Amino acid sequence: MDKKDILSGKVLEGIEFERKLAFWRFKDSSLVALYGTFDVFHPSVFDLITYAAEQGHELIVGVKSDSDVKKEKGEKFPIFNQEQRAAMVSAHQLVSAVYICEDGPEEFIKKVKPEVAVCCSHASDTDKKALEIAREWGAKVDIYEGSTTSIDDIASKIK
């Protein structure tokens, strides 16, 4: 198995995703769900993922679908497609699994049923609100306030 196969093995869907979640629950692992676009991997994204991973045993990252990014940010986005963004996120050593969220953040959170749901402070109000569903089963909702450079911040520096 080459290194690229190892990374792609972290990007899960369907029954593979369900099985991995069941395995972690069986082990009584504390699950952390992190949801976002992850369009350009920069130091703030690295810090966010590291922070989220510190909140529990297994970090499951939900990557926003291309269609949801376009609806939110316009036709120029995303810069990288959802498969590329998922691959970039999976390369972070602390990420246990990556899931492309075709059905939005709320369905992702319902599937994972994490003990902690995390997003960054510059996430859209819609995304932040969707994470609130985790409170239904007593999960903590954590809005990361650390270094949160956005793609808009980076784009304005380039111009």
Image: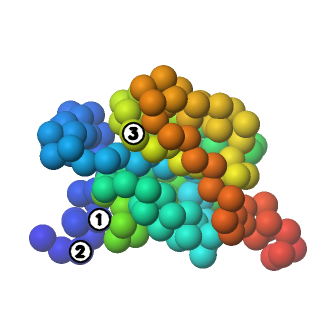
The amino acid sitting under disc 2 is Lys
The amino acid sitting under disc 3 is Pro
Look at the image and tell me whether residue 62 can be seen: no
> Gap between marks 2 and 1, in whole Å?
6 Å
Question: Which label lies toward us, 3 or 2?
Answer: 3
Image location (x, y in percent) of residue 145: 68, 59
The amino acid sitting under disc 1 is Leu
| CB-based contact (under 8 Å), mark 2 and mark 1 | yes
Which callout, 3 or 2, points at the residue further toward the start of the chain? 2
Asked which secondary structure carries label 3, the reply is: loop
Image location (x, y in percent) of residue 14: 27, 34
Look at the image and tell me whether residue 2 can be seen: yes
Residue at horizontal 36%, vertical 36%?
112
Q: Which mark is residue 81?
A: none
Q: Which residue is mark 2?
A: 3
Question: Please, which colouring scheme is shown?
Answer: rainbow
> Gap between marks 3 and 2, in whole Å?
28 Å
Q: Which residue is mark 1?
A: 7
Tell me the quarter of the picture where residue 90 sits.
bottom left
Q: Is residue 30 above or below residue 85?
A: above
Image location (x, y in percent) of residue 69: 64, 43
Asked which secondary structure carries label 1, the reply is: helix
Q: Which residue is mark 3?
A: 114
Residue at horizontal 71%, vertical 41%?
124
* Side of 90 where 129 appears, left or right: right
Tell me the quarter of the picture where residue 16 sits.
top left
* Mark 3 neighbour class, 10 Å CA radius: few under 14, some 14 to 19, many 20 or more: many
Which callout, 1 or 3, points at the residue further toward the start of the chain? 1
Which of the pair 17/141 is nearer the observer?
141
Which of the pair 121/149 is nearer the observer?
121
Image location (x, y in percent) of residue 36: 57, 49
